[in-house]
Image: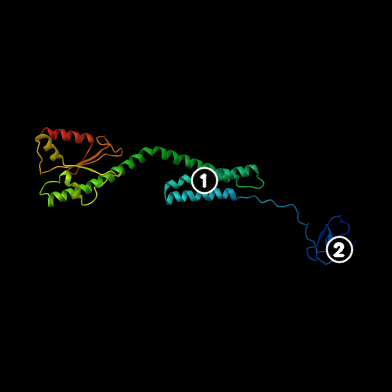
Amino acid sequence: MSAKLGVGERSTQSMLCPCCGESVFRGARECTCGARFVGEPLDETPIKVQRLGPAMTSIALLALVVVGALVATKWIAAAGVLVMWSAWRAVKLARRNAEWYGGYKTAVTTLTLTTVGCLGIATYGIAHIPKAIENYKLRQTAATEASMHHAASLLEDYRLKVGRGSYPRLQDFKMVMGESVPADYWENSLKYQPVDANLADTAIGITTLFVDSFELRSNGPDGIAGNDDDIIMRDGIFLTSAEAKKKTVAQQHR
């Protein structure tokens, strides 16, 4: 064998010259075309590259949830469950096949941080449930009181311009409104009562044409009159159900 074929380093295996494509023995120093081999041929064993996609995905989701909760609304933090699932999946893949999947420590850290954060948010949310319910009830009451203020304003206009110092009688109430009777938050019409006119009917047995007091009443969320959740306005002042009863008794004994 010629020196170009690497005498003394014979091998039964052959390879193709990357320059001319001629078959040469492995271990040869030089090919007949003049190309020289400067190193051992590359190992044909496939190179395994660890995949970091699952771990990186969990980090990206965590970043999106945090930014969304800070910029938009804190309720986006509930999407932390999705981050936990993604991080747990990355942990399982890295643990099951560490040769192909990397980022085990990163996924564990992401899972831990997200779990702690979700538990903290859940604790905060549960602790504030009573306050949230109370705020919701306050909004309902405020909406109903706004309707009552609107009705009271129309009644006052009637008293000053049309009624000559007297509020309208019960049968004239809808006419005074000039529109549908205002409703409370629960879509029930407000109840109007010219208080002094009714008292005059009961005590004296006659109908007075002069009404100097009125009552607007909402039956509250249960829709039943006479309960403690009733919302009552008398002459522009809001009263509890108990206060309204005391005031009625006091008027009847004047």
- Residue matched to label 2: 4
Disc number placed over residue 216 in the picture, else none: none
User: Is the residue marked by circle 2 packed among few (<14), some (14-19), or many (20+) residues within 10 Å?
Assistant: some
Q: Quadrant of residue 85?
A: top right
Residue indicated by mark 1: 82
- Give the class, few, some or many, for how many residues have Cα within 10 Å of label 1's Cα (few <14, many ≥20): some
Q: Residue at x 62, y 44 (%)?
A: 93
Q: Nearer the viewer, residue 151 or 199?
A: 199
User: Between 176 and 205, which is closer to the camera in this rendering?
Assistant: 205
Residue at the spot 13% in from the left edge and 34% down from the top edge: 252
Left or right placement of residue 90 versus residue 249 in this view: right
Name the kind of residue labelled 2 in the image. Answer: Lys
Q: Is residue 55 above or below residue 199?
A: below
Q: Is residue 18 above or below residue 243?
A: below
Residue 30 found in image quarter: bottom right
Q: Residue at x 17, y 45 (%)?
A: 171
Q: Position of residue 178 (x, y in %)?
A: 20, 52
Q: Which residue is at 45% across, 40% downward?
A: 120
Task: Tell me the amino acid under the disc marked 1.
Answer: Leu
182 horizontally vs 81: left or right? left
- Helix or strand or loop: what does disc 2 sit on? helix
Tell which circle, 2 or 1, labels the residue nearer the N-terminal end: 2
Q: Secondary structure at mark 1?
A: helix
Q: Is residue 33 above or below residue 209?
A: below
Which of the two residues, 237 or 117, is positioned nearer the viewer here? 237
**Quarter of the image with the N terminus in it:** bottom right
